[in-house]
Amino acid sequence: MPVVRDLCVLLRLKHFRRLLTVRLLSQAADGVYQVALATYVVFSPEKQASPGAIASAMAVLLLPYSLVGPFAGVLLDRWQRRSVFLYGNLLRALLAGCTALLVLGSAPDWLFYASALAVTAVNRFVLAGLSASLPRVVDAERLVMANSLSPTAGTLAATAGGGLAFVLRLVIDADAATVVLGAVLYLFASLASLRLPPALLGPDPTDARPGLATALRSTVRGLADGVRHLSRRRPAALVLTAMTLMRFCYGALTVMLLMLCRYAWSDGPEKNSGTGGLALLGLAVGVSGAGFFAAAVLTPWAVARLGPFRWIVVCSVAAAVLVPALGLPFEPTPMLVAAFVLGLVTQGAKITTDTVIQSTVDDSYRGRIFSLYDVLFNMAFVGAAAVAAQMLPADGRSATLVVTVALIYAAVAAFMTRFSRA
């Protein structure tokens, strides 16, 4: 397979191999920690999870990406990147250990969320540093290949870490143990960075850099320039709007699924612990991931035949029809089918949106547009969780939410159809 062959070529490069090890351990720890946070908030027997608590947890997981992300590069260009990996992952290991103690001690929710927020905020710097370091460990000819394979491998590691956390939680039934596993993996990632030479990853200390205040002001101005540029690139603006709305729908349905797994589908002696619902949630995450993979295979073929805008129309129409058909019974089996469909259509639309932005936005603005894209993508998810918290009953069965989401998907299909015809 070409992918396997390309990866084998890259793995012959010693420093790429070591940097990839840091990425895999770090993102596997992210997967473990995020699942540990979700299961503690939703499935702990001593906590009566509410949609509001789930919305708070999602804000903790995603807001750092939105608020810190655009400014992470300003600081990264002033710090040795290997130091970011070493001390950033070490700091996260310590903070995750503190989170485990807070779980054991039944600490107030605000203190728990503050600890979790600190862990996820550091993650933005580590991930940005990993991407910025790639040109230092591969040559120019292999850089595109490395940019394709390295983040994909990291995503798979995060998924594997999340799966491991689900299994550990089902076997041991102890949230603190799952958090400790994440802390250990963060520690291993920190130690793995020591195998990289300190100055290898940059930045070059001789490079001239503006002052921090000047750089921060420049970043804000750059984002404003990006918004103005986007207003002049109608195709990019429309697909970004469509993707934001579809991400909102995905977030609202995710909160509903969490509540269904915690209360509606946890029956019998397992109801208080939520073990049965946790197993279903793990299965739903896996099924949704299969939908993501299917989208990666299907989208290039579909875009080549339909064009990017009609493919987004097909994705949104499929969701508008199938979400109420599969979701309104509020039963596990059709909901698992819906999880696959939503994974496929959401990722299919995202891949298409990425492509349209890359092909229609001027290169000099592309980085700023993708920063805005990142902010909108995560804020839509957090906003959806907040809205769902107001609409969902305690057991998660809300026909109103399902119908509202279906209407949003239909609206996306309508305005994208109009644009594709134009």
Image (cartoon, grey):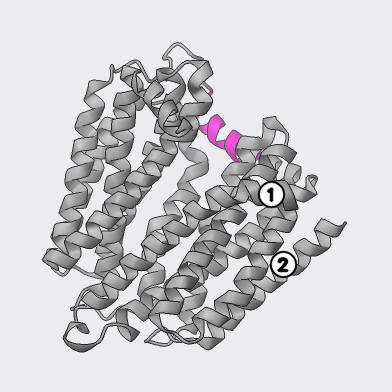
Residue 252 appears in the figure: yes
Q: Give SS at disc 1.
A: helix
Residue 339, horizontal then vertical, whole percent: 46, 68
User: Any mark on residue 339, and which?
Assistant: none
User: Closer to the observer: label 1 or label 2?
Assistant: 1
- Image position of 94 (left or right of 332): left
Q: Which mark is residue 303?
A: 1
> Which of the pair 179/353 is nearer the observer?
353
Question: Label 1 crowding class (10 Å Cα cut-off): few <14, some 14-19, many 20+?
Answer: some
Amino acid type of the residue tagged 2 in the rendering: Ala
The residue at 34%/66% (across/down) is 283
Q: Residue at x 70, y 40 (%)?
A: 225
Left or right: residue 246 versus residue 387 is: right
The residue nearer to you, when weighing 146 against 360, is 146
Q: From the viewer's side, name the closer residue of 378 and 23.
A: 23
Q: Which residues are magenta?
A: 210-221
Question: Label 2's element?
Answer: helix
Q: Please state, as top left, top right, bottom left or bottom right, where the N terminus lies in the image.
A: top left
The residue carrying pointer 2 sits among few (fewer than 14), some (14 to 19) or many (20 or more) residues within 10 Å by Cα, namely many
Give how far apart the Cα atoms at labels 1 and 2 are.
Answer: 16 Å
Residue 366's image quarter? top right
In the figure, residue 128 lies in which quadrant?
top left
Whole-percent x and y of residue 59? 42, 62
Q: Earlier in the sequence, mark 1 or mark 2?
A: 1
Residue 238, percent from left and from top: 73, 55
Q: Is residue 261 left or right of residue 239?
A: left
> Which residue lies at the image location 75% right of the left edge and 45% below the top edge?
228
Magenta span main SS: helix
Mark 2, residue position? 413
Q: In the rendered image of this protein, does residue 38 appear above or below residue 51?
A: above
